[in-house]
Image (cartoon, grey):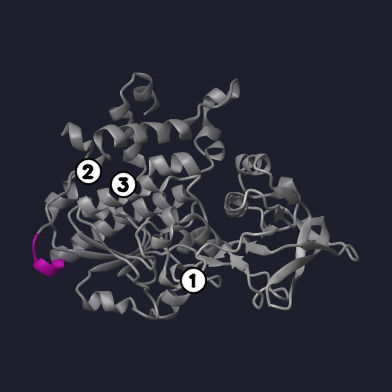
Amino acid sequence: ALFLLGQGDFIGAALKFMESSNFPDVCGRICPQEKQCEGSCVIANRNPAVCIGKLEAFVIDYVRKNYGYPRREKAAPTGMKVAVVGAGPAGLAVLGHQVVVYDMWPYPGGLLLYGIPNFKLNKDIVFAKIRGLEEMGIHFVCNFRVGKDHPLEEFFKQGFDLVFLGYGAVKGGEMKVPGEDELQNIYQATEYLVRGNLSPELLPDVWRNLPHPKPHHTGVTIVIGGGDTAMDCVRTARRLNPDAKVYCVYRRSEVEMPGRYEERVNAVEEGVQFEWLTAPVKFIGDEEGKVKAAECIRMKLGAPDAKGRRSPVPIEGSNFIINCDTVALAIGYSPETDIPESTPNLKTTKWGSVVVESEETGVTSREDLYAAGDNVRGADLVVTAVAAARKAAVSMHNKLLAIREKKYRVASTEYRARTTEYRVPSTE
């Protein structure tokens, strides 16, 4: 792709990128290229690495704006149906299968629309991708919560042959300190980011119908956490109220922060103040039940944990107060448990992640259910979720053809051999 780009063949470069990634324009913006493709760049042995992420995003944007989003030719219908819970392997539609995507949010897009702020990912890119998927024949059903409200077994009664689980990890972590659950204006990161970055018409009814759809943003905002989501929250806070003071409170030092260095630099440039080696022990409220302060304690680093990072240890007697009006908790995510709890014979880990026999296949403990992404690995990168879903799609395709042969007593050789290439709409 880079060779084609260097030759000025932007269309060819875009199509080459699309061969290995469903979302090169997205991953080129939000994934940590410095640890992935650019981290393996041989140019970096003597010079700065090639900016692969920015080139990837540029070339797809250029082709999309001038020629249309690259898409693949669809195969003849197979008669097989797949239900996708959350974002999933849309490539199955290209291979001739009927795909219906069910999503709990009001509009399709999942994390790309509802989790990543506009200043990192322009939503026009997401909307263009969704339109392309709809043109491929994929049907989206929104405001549909699978699990206790709609058990997975309903899909099989409706004639679906397989179900793919790609519902991600959206359950926010809890600090379990006094005041966390009782006081107003303390938000989980997802709610804070969704309400803080999206226009009201895109919000779920429960937030859109509030007197003030935006999260509270006067006075001082504290964000708890040290990952990229925490950086998204502090930068969102600065945009909600440029005059307000914003703190990022993290229990380890800057060296141990899991988020991207680039994100921290952006936050500092935008005026965010960092409190390293600090952790809240209690949130304090006013007479109206609104948070007014966080009691914090200083930490020191002890022995390394299982991941090699040094564990934070409280320093006795170091408690102090940070006055605040808003708190956002960005301390990790785990998968929701509604689906596993309502689905017989679906194995999960103690953290609620779906167990698969291999990420190469995505096969779960049930042969009619496949899974990939954050609901398998835990909260991770978009690029890893896309890669796992692509592998699961291949596995599901082969399974669907086997079911088809048995169901209709016909050979599926022509579908197994079928390959399709990406094309640009206005050049076809």
Of the residues tagged 3 and 1, which is closer to the observer? 1
Q: Position of residue 25 (x, y in %)?
A: 40, 40
The amino acid type found where label 1 is placed reads: Leu
- Residue found 59% across the figure and 21% down from its top: 47
Tag shown at residue 210 = 1
As drawn, the residue found furthest toward the right would be 317
Badge 1: how crowded within 10 Å, few (<14), some, or many (20+)?
A: few
Q: Position of residue 388 (x, y in %)?
A: 40, 53
- Residue found 22% across the figure and 43% down from its top: 72
Q: Circle 2 sits in a helix, a strand or a loop, which is it? A: strand
Q: Quadrant of the N terminus?
A: top left
Dot placed on the residue nearer the N-terminal end, 3 or 1: 3
The amino acid type found where label 2 is placed reads: Arg
Q: Circle 1 sits in a helix, a strand or a loop, which is it? A: loop
Question: Where is 349 relative to 62, above or below?
Answer: below
Dot placed on the residue nearer the N-terminal end, 2 or 1: 2
Disc 3 target residue: 128
* Distance of label 3 from label 2 (alpha carbons): 15 Å
Of the residues tagged 3 and 2, which is closer to the observer? 3
- What are the residue bounds of the magenta stretch? 406-410
Dot placed on the residue nearer the N-terminal end, 3 or 2: 2
* Distance of label 2 from label 1 (alpha carbons): 42 Å
Main secondary-structure element of the magenta-colored stretch? helix
Q: Position of residue 303 (x, y in %)?
A: 79, 56
Pointer 2 with pointer 1, Cβ within 8 A: no
Q: Nearer the viewer, residue 254 or 124?
A: 124
Disc 2 target residue: 72
